[in-house]
Amino acid sequence: MSSKEGGSKITKSDLNKIFLRSMTFEGSWDYERQMYLANAFTLGPIIKKLYPLKEDRADALKRHLEFFNITPYLATLVCGIVTAMEEVKANGGEIGGEAISNVKTSLMGPLSGIGDSLFLTTWRTVTAGIGCSIAMQGNPLGAVLFFLLFNIPAQAVHYICAIKGYEMGSKLLVKLSETNIMKRLTRLTGVVGMMAVGAMIASMVSVTTPLAFGSGDEALAIQGVLDQIMPCLLSVIATAVIYWVMGKKPNTAVVLVSIVVFSIACSAVGIL
């Protein structure tokens, strides 16, 4: 079922709210789930509009309070696509909450690579160079020029992504529904989502050991053996243990402090 079959409820005004609320992506961030609060805040009005029942709203908000991290200027593209998917789900379509979460996970990594390279590495450097060259001549307009040169195109992309993300998502979902491959899409996004999670573990979790058997040039480094078995094996094990612990719903602060204390103790005795 497409979003149109149940009656499209999302308007241009709703997409404008996504754009405005997404300004909080850099203002609400923590080490546990990074931009998750801003993501839920951005999609809040959409969820409220699509789901009249309190239980459905709670389920949707919980789905968008999962880990989320992306270049802010492209965050609205994901939010627009997710909005189209939530609309189909609310209208009784063949989309489950797991598929929506998988799409978010699979998109935020590649889009962050593009966004960071385009805006934060390239365009910000160019515009800062222009602004600094003027400011170094004693002209305070250099700072203003940098602000305008960087933010006007960045915010234009930020806004366009919200509109185009929803339009692309709606059109794609209609085509998928007409060809009856929605279940296959759900399965594929699950695979891509798990690949993205694996990539994040390899790039964001670093656990190594300096232990070795023997001495001198003949010493056998345990880390080298583990890397031959599977690269980042200790990182995967650490992530799996923490995932299991979090499944018990403990106090997050206690878990974080415990990880810090354990890491310091292992480093002190030369284990990790």
Image (cartoon, rainbow, N blue to C red):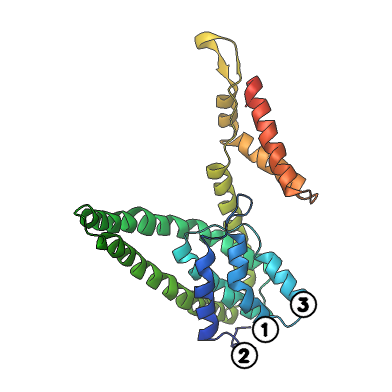
Q: Residues within 10 Å of mark 2 (few under 14, many from 20)?
A: few
Q: Please, what secondary structure does the residue beneath circle 2 have?
A: loop
Residue at 36% over, 66% down:
151
Q: Is residue 77 left or right of residue 29?
A: left
Label 3 is placed on what type of residue? Lys
Between the residue at mark 2 and the residue at mark 1, the CA separation in whole angstroms equals: 8 Å
Label 1 is placed on what type of residue? Asn
Q: Position of residue 45 (x, y in %)?
A: 62, 78
Observer-nearest residue: 168 or 78?
A: 78
Observer-nearest residue: 193 or 153?
A: 153
Q: Quadrant of residue 135?
A: bottom left
Q: Which residue is mark 2?
A: 7
Q: Position of residue 4 (x, y in %)?
A: 59, 88
In this rendering, the answer to whether 181 lies above or below 232 is below
Residue at 69% over, 33% down:
261
Mark 1 or 3, closer to the camera: 3
Q: Which residue is mark 3?
A: 54
Q: Which residue is mark 1?
A: 91
